Image (tube, grey):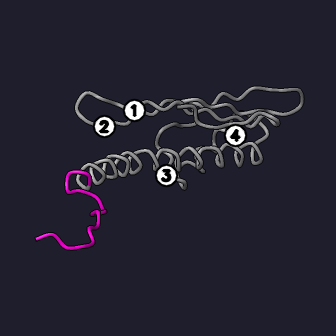
């Protein structure tokens, strides 16, 4: 029999819940793979800034970067990848590299990172 007050059911269906959990899982896995590369990039930016402050010649800058890289767990680049250029009386350091992150099967995520110590120039990852 039918009661006097009928209420609409509210909530999420089981299929909707599964889809939402799957999407959250994909975003979570993607975040777990990308965040370490961003943290490493931040370490690289700090290392090139410290190397610029420590060194007066390109050789000293590269040696200082190698010391910073060994302490900061930087594996993506080495001091050979640094582009040290003379700008007037001071030396500027530029670095650019790509990071390939495997996703599923033949699919990869490619992130371009670049940083510089030139004042007034923003250095950020470009995806």
Q: Give the range drawn in magenta.
A: 1-16
Few, some or many C-alpha atoms within 10 Å of disc 4 (few <14, some 14-19, many ≥20)? many
Tell me how far mark 1 sits from mark 3, CA to CA. 22 Å
Secondary structure beneath disc 1?
A: strand
The residue that mark 3 highlights is 73
The residue that mark 1 highlights is 109
Counting residues from the N terminus, which is met first, the one under dot 2 or under dot 1? 2
- Whether 25 is among the magenta residues is no
Q: Residue at x 71, y 45 (%)?
A: 49
Foreground tag (4 vs 1): 1
Examine the residues drawn in magenta and state their main secondary structure: loop
The residue that mark 4 highlights is 61
- Whether 5 is among the magenta residues is yes
Residue 125: x %, y % from top left: 58, 36
Tell me how far mark 2 sits from mark 4, CA to CA. 36 Å
Circles 2 and 1, Cβ within 8 Å, touching? The answer is yes
Q: Residue at x 58, y 29 (%)?
A: 96
Instruction: Say which quarter of the image contains residue 118.
Output: top right
Counting residues from the N terminus, which is met first, the one under dot 2 or under dot 3? 3
Foreground tag (2 vs 4): 2
Circles 2 and 4, Cβ within 8 Å, touching? The answer is no
Counting residues from the N terminus, which is met first, the one under dot 4 or under dot 1? 4
The residue that mark 2 highlights is 103
């Amino acid at each position: 029999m039918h009661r006097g007050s009928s209420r609409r059911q509210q909530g999420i269906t089981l299929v909707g819940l599964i889809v939402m959990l799957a999407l959250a899982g994909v975003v979570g896995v993607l975040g777990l793979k990308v965040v370490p590369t961003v943290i490493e990039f931040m370490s690289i930016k700090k290392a090139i800034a410290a190397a610029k402050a420590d060194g007066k010649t390109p050789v000293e800058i590269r040696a200082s970067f190698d010391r910073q890289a060994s302490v900061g767990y930087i594996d993506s680049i080495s001091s050979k990848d640094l582009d040290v250029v003379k700008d007037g009386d001071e030396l500027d350091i530029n670095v650019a590299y790509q990071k390939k992150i495997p996703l599923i099967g033949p699919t990869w995520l490619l992130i371009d990172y670049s940083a510089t110590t030139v004042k007034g120039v923003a250095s950020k990852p470009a995806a």
